[in-house]
Image (tube, rainbow, N blue to C red):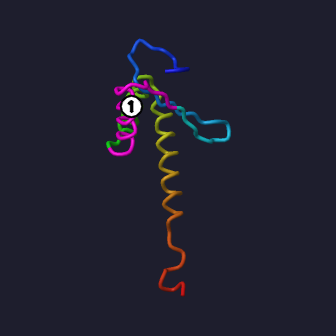
Amino acid sequence: MSGRVESELSTRCELMLYVDQKGVISFLCDWDQDEAGVEALGDVLYKLKHENLVDTMVTSLYKQCVLSNKLETFNKVLACIHEKVLNKSGDDKVVIRPTKAI
C-alpha cells in the first residue's frame, strides 16, 4: 500500500476522511491489492451503508468522550448532526402538491 502510515496493526484497508477550512469533505482510500485487501474494502463500504457502522463509530466516540471528560464536546457534535438532519428534511417538503401543479 503506497503512502499509508504503517502501524502495529496489520492493516488491509484504510479510509481517511478530511474536512478542509471551507467545510468540504473529501476522503482517501487505500487497500492491499490482494484478495484480502479487496475484501476488506468491500467490508468497510458494506458496513458503512448496510450495517450502521456510523452508529457504531458514534457510540465509540461517545465512550471516548466520557472517559476523557469531553461529553460537552460530544453533545455539540450531536447537536450539529441533529441540525443538519432537520435542515435536510426541510428540503424535502412539497411546496406545491403534484395534483395542483397542472
* Residue at 54%, 35% in the rendered image: 27
Residue sitting at the far top? 8
What's the magenta region?
A: 29-50
Q: Where in the figure is residue 98, as x and y percent of width and height? A: 49, 80
Residue bearing mark 1: 38
Amino acid on which disc 1 is placed: Val
Residue sitting at the far right? 22
Residue 56 forms part of the magenta stretch: no
Q: Nearer the viewer, residue 18 or 13?
A: 13
* Residue at 39%, 27% in the rendered image: 37
Element carrying mark 1: helix
Residue sitting at the far left? 51
Q: Nearer the viewer, residue 17 or 13?
A: 13
Q: Where in the figure is residue 47, as x and y percent of width and height? A: 35, 39
Q: Where in the figure is residue 93, as x and y percent of width and height? A: 50, 69
* Residue at 38%, 17% in the rendered image: 10
